[in-house]
Amino acid sequence: MTKEIPVITIDGPSGAGKGSVAAIIAEKLGWNLLDSGAIYRLLALSAIKKNIDFENSELLTEEAKRLNVEFIPQKGSEIRILLDGEDVTGEIRTEKCGNTASKIAAILPVRDALLQRQRDFAKEPGLVADGRDMGTVVFSSAAAKIFLTASAEERAKRRYKQLKQKEFNVNLAALVKEIEERDLRDTTRKVAPLKPAEDAIVIDSSNLDIDQVVQQIMQHIDLV
C-alpha cells in the first residue's frame, strides 16, 4: 500500500512539534492525517476508562483490535480526536495518558494489533503520518521521511507553556526529568526503538518556529 499511495512520515521524540507540523502539511497537501502517538494514547485512555490492567498484554491487545478511532482535521494545526464517537482531544493529552501510552507501546502484541490499523490510514490522495516508528516500521517505503527533534530542555519549555495555559500546576524541572526518562525508555526499548530511519532527513527544531520547520520539510518533499 505504501508503494502505491504516497506517504510522508514525521517521526521524533515527544514535544518536538511533529504533530502540529504534520497537521499543517496534511492540510497544505489536502492529504489524510495519522497521529500514531494519539492511537497509543487512545488505547491507554480506553484501558484507563475500562480498568484494564496495563500489565495484561492479552486484554490490551484485544482492546487495541477493536479501538474505534477518528481523526478530524480542523483549521491550522488543530485536530479533533474521537474515541467511540466521543471527543477526547484534550483528555488524551494528560501526562498520565502519555506515560501509560509510552509503556504499553513497548508491548509487542499490542504494537502488532495496531500496526495494520495504522497502515489502513494510507488512502488517496496520500497520507502524512507522525509518530516514532512511522518511517522505520509502519511505512518503511514512505516517499519522504522526516525525523524531527529538539533538546529535552526546549521540549519541556514548550510542554510547560502548554500546561500553564490550561492552568495546570506544573514544574519545569520535573518536566525535563520526565522527558529525559521517556526518551531513554523509547530509544532503548527492544521493540521498535525511537531512531531516525536510515534515509530520513533529520531536523532539529530547538531554535525554529513551526513555520520554519514546515518550510524546511516542504522543501525536502519529493514525490515524483
Image (spheres, rainbow, N blue to C red):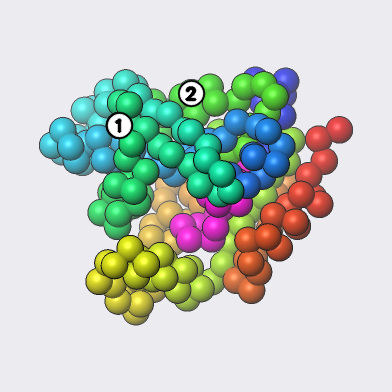
| Above or below, 130 relative to 62 | below
Toward the front, the furthest residue is 75
Indicate the secondary structure of the residue bearing disc 1: strand
Residue 148 location (% of width, % of height): 61, 57
The image quadrant of residue 203 is: bottom right
- Which disc, if any, is residue 116? 2
Mark seen at residue 86: 1
Residue occupying the far bottom of the picture: 173
| Pointers 2 and 1 in contact (C-beta within 8 Å) | no
User: Based on the displayed image, in which of its 4 quarters is residue 95 positioned?
Assistant: bottom left
Range of the magenta residues?
Answer: 9-22
Crowding near the residue tagged with mark 1, few <14, some 14–19, many ≥20 C-alpha atoms within 10 Å? few
Q: Give the residue drawn at x 68%, y 60%.
A: 211
Q: Residue at x 76, y 49 (%)?
A: 218
The label on residue 50 is: none
Amino acid marked by disc 2? Gln
